[in-house]
Amino acid sequence: MDVIVDKFVSLWKISAVRQNFHWFFLAISFLGSILKELQLVPNTYFSGPKSFLNVYLVKVGWGWTLLLLTPFLLLSNASLNRSGSFVFRRLLSLVVATACWYVCTETFFYIENVTGSCSATDADDVRSKDLTSKITCVRAGFQWHGFDISGHSFLLLYSALFIVEETAPMAYLKTASLSTLPSIVLSLLYISLNALVIVWIFMFACTSVYFHDPAQKLVGTLCAILAWHLTYGVWYLHQWSPGLPPVRQLKPQKQRA
């Protein structure tokens, strides 16, 4: 287990990897969109919305992110700074991220609703015109066509960026003197979170090559990058915020004779 932890720690300690992680997703979205428009990727198990990963992971993706990241934040921050106010302040990053996720996704739904219209066959065309919201349209058995910003692109990228930011202290926890149980729990959580990032990258690629129009995916991707930048790149630099994850180098304790 330590070997796996060390591999992930070594990867994220490379500044070029961390600083350009969002560009990696943008590249996937751009190239995937080209492949989709040119229809160069054949349909697979993951081209349908009912794949196992989509139904049981992506559909409740934010829940999985919080489920694993909450105990990690609690243990890692408490190990680096035992101040209750500090730990509470850092846990507020979960609240802020959840608020960003909720506001953005609800905004996406609103935009799709106000830009769309209900469509049907010619026989039902008169009836469908009376349905002015996506919910009523779909419930009536028709299709709603609006600007459907890719919620998957937003969720998967924002979750990945959020996880990478908040797991950064693991590189310094390796030098801290932790008791056996917290160390094992942190390692298991850290490995699970990185495995989740890998799944999010894969599903982001599937979204890019199988679903949505290029503009819809681009807007969802840019919204995720903007939410991440405004928090970790701007707001969290100030004192009146949850603050950045503690990444100060811990000095190894001297061995006793």
Image (cartoon, rainbow, N blue to C red):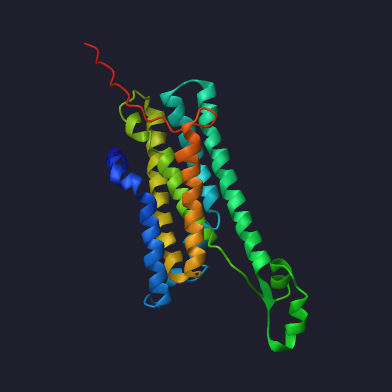
**For residue 9, side relative to residue 103 (left or right):** left
Residue 46 in the image, given as x and y percentages of width and height: 44, 68
The quadrant the C terminus occupies is top left
Q: Residue at x 71, y 72 (%)?
A: 137
Compared with 107, 169 (above or below) is: above
Residue 89, visible in the rendered structure:
yes
Residue 33 percent coordinates (x, y):
42, 69
Q: Is residue 239 above or below residue 230?
A: above
**Residue extending farthest bottom:** 123
**In the figure, 117 relative to 71: above or below?**
below
Looking at the rendered image, the quarter that the N terminus falls into is top left
Residue drawn at (53%, 32%) of the image: 241
Q: Residue at x 33, y 30 (%)?
A: 172
Most foreground residue, 176 or 142: 142
Q: Is residue 114 left or right of residue 36?
A: right
- Based on the displayed image, in which of its 4 quarters is residue 177 positioned? top left
Which x, y percent locates residue 123?
A: 73, 88
- 253 relative position to 78: left or right: left
Report whether 112 appears left or right of 212: right
Residue 187: which quarter of the image? top left
Which percent across, then down, holds residue 208? 43, 66
Q: Nearer the viewer, residue 251 or 7?
A: 251
Q: Nearer the viewer, residue 127 or 82?
A: 127
